[in-house]
Image (cartoon, helix red, strand yellow):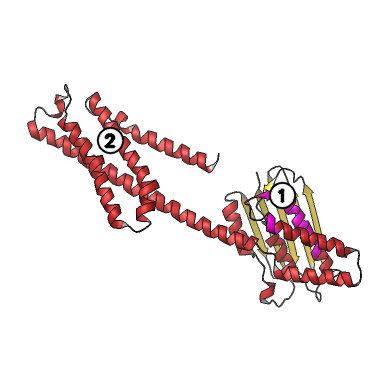
Amino acid sequence: MSTLKKNILFHSIGILVFLSIPVIFPPYSQPFLIKEIESFVLIVLFFYLNYYYLVPNFYFKKQYISYGGILMVLFFFITIIPVFMLYSHTPEGSKGWVEPHGMRGFLSPFYSDIKRNLLLFATAFFASIAFRINDHLKKLNQEKINAELSYLKAQINPHFLFNTLNSIYSLAIVKSEKTATSIVKLSGMMRYVISETSKKFVSLEKEMNYIDSYIDLQKIRLGETAIVNYSFNGDVKDKLIAPLMLIPFIENAFKHGVNPEEPSQIDIQLSVSETNLYLHVFNLKVPHRFSKADHSGFGLENARNQLVYLYPGKHQLKIDDTAFSFTVNLNINIT
């Protein structure tokens, strides 16, 4: 069920439960029951008026005086006037409201209903403003995350790009047959980043093509200086994934697991089932000196945040960081 449908169902149930209160605890006579339901309907209308219009247009814009004046007018028309009209037009046959205690017997339920309406009005006010502020904070946080993701997705790690271009240049000098293939792979990666990664979800097949090209170019760049074991199995047809979701973990292995002067090994295993995607990345740790240019465009922390945002409750991430190796195991429900 979509979020919109869940919200509609939640609000519908809430309204029905609220409006059923006068029916479950009815007043003394049928005419009063109708007026009671009308009062509850007014409270519901006030809740949504405050939630959708007054809070965004007055409270959030700090127009507190105008907001307070509107609330006072609404309070008067919603809580006091309906009760006053109800008791000033006491229907025939409802003597139980005013007798046998005369005016005192009349005023007692009158003020009781005013207090009840005041409580309902205050509850609707605080609930609507609290829900709206909560939604507003969620929206701001989502916009912040979207801005961060858009920025991160709009770039390829510059260090990887420069190294790859240098490798292609070296291949071109010796007139290697791999030159044209490398250029095509790099071009495809850049096209994918520019045209696809602004979307929330993309074809898993395109994402896998990006990963394949990245690993192939890394193998060309590294040559014999590292052992790279990469395997993939499963069917990617008709499956979606958040763009560049997996590459930070793979990129991290090449960043920390390769040194021409040390034994270097990187293992990458990817598998896809009907409902889940599994990623295993292992690398031996080798000594490095990093410059700012070596800094990954994403970073593992950003990858974690992206997982939490895009796959809440639908992923399991386990990272084993030892003195000599680094292992990532990631399981994502992609249904």
- The CA distance from mark 1 to mark 2 is 54 Å
Which residue shows up at 33% across the image and 42% down it? Answer: 46
Residue 201 painted magenta:
yes
Q: Nearer the viewer, residue 153 or 230?
A: 153
Type of the residue with mark 1: Leu
Q: Position of residue 244 (x, y in %)?
A: 68, 57
Q: Earlier in the sequence, mark 1 or mark 2?
A: 2
Type of the residue with mark 2: Ser
Q: Count residues near mark 2 (Cα–Cα under 10 Å), then give few for <14, some for 14-19, many for 20+.
A: many
Q: Position of residue 55 (x, y in %)?
A: 36, 51
Q: Which quarter of the figure is the N terminus placed in?
A: top right
Which residue shows up at 29% across the image and 32% down it? Answer: 38
Residue 78 painted magenta:
no
Which stretch is magenta? 193-217
Q: Position of residue 105 (x, y in %)?
A: 11, 33
Q: Which quarter of the figure is the C terminus placed in?
A: top right
Q: Count residues near mark 1 (Cα–Cα under 10 Å), then give few for <14, some for 14-19, many for 20+.
A: many
Residue of label 1: 204
In the rendered image of this protein, does residue 268 appear above or below residue 89?
below
Q: Quadrant of residue 111?
A: top left
